Image: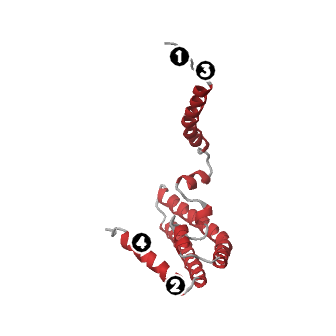
Amino acid sequence: MNFNFATPRSLSALAMAAALVAAPLAASAAGTSSDGAHRMHKAGHHFKRHHAGFAHHGAARAWRALDLTQDQQDQIFKIRHDQAQAFYDGKKALRAAHGALRDVSRADSFDAAKAQQAADALGQAQARMTLLRVQTRAQIQAVLTAEQRQKLADMRSHKRADKPAKS
């Protein structure tokens, strides 16, 4: 038996196999940066998808299910775009507050005043983000028709009913 491994077909198959093996390795090597972008990507948090408080992956599906007009889509895009910087700043404040609280908890000696200050900062950052989400949702709800709002409410209640109860 004489095997000729240098045929164009076998070389292209070998190249394809090498690419399939190398791609995950290259991706993991590229993702070892020390910046937060890798952590955010790895955790599935993409600014494009989440920049306006719609953190659920099904949000795009929900918007499609509502049969939005082009004008409604444009208005919702503008609302989300206008809020993007505020959400970015809020998430940055949350990360900083979590970091400060973590640092206080890891200190050699516990300082109750610093812990209270860090906890208050975290609470305020969470409150600002919650308010921003509620305001954005209200602005978007105002763009929808009564039928679309009802359909969205039905989808949300159906989603909640599908979730297992927390124990």
Q: CA distance from mark 4 to mark 1?
A: 59 Å
Tell me which amino acid carries mark 2: Glu
The disc, 2 or 4, on the residue closer to the chain's N-terminal end is 2
**Between discs 4 and 3, the one toward the N terminus:** 3
Q: Nearer the viewer, residue 34 or 58?
A: 58
Where residue 159 is drawn, which disc sits there? 4
Q: Is 81 displayed left or right of 125 in the figure?
A: right
Q: Residue at x 53, y 16 (%)?
A: 3
| Residue 27 quadrant | top right
Q: Position of residue 10 (x, y in %)?
A: 57, 26
Q: Is residue 109 above or below residue 141?
A: above
Q: Which residue is mark 1?
A: 3
Q: Nearer the viewer, mark 3 or mark 2?
A: 3
> Which numbered tag is attached to residue 6?
3
Circle 3: residue type: Ala
Q: CA distance from mark 2 to mark 1?
A: 69 Å
Depth order, front residue of 126/163? 163
Whole-number angstrom distance, CA of label 3 to CA of label 2: 65 Å
Say above or below: 137 vs 52. below
**Mark sitting earlier along the chain (2/1):** 1
Circles 4 and 1, Cβ within 8 Å, touching? The answer is no
Residue under label 2: 147
Badge 1 crowding class, 10 Å Cα cut-off, few under 14, some 14 to 19, many 20 or more, is few
Graded by Cα atoms within 10 Å as few (under 14), some (14 to 19) or many (20 or more), the crowding at tag 2 reads few
Mark-to-mark CA distance, 2 and 4: 18 Å
Q: Earlier in the sequence, mark 3 or mark 2?
A: 3
| Secondary structure category for the residue under label 4 | helix
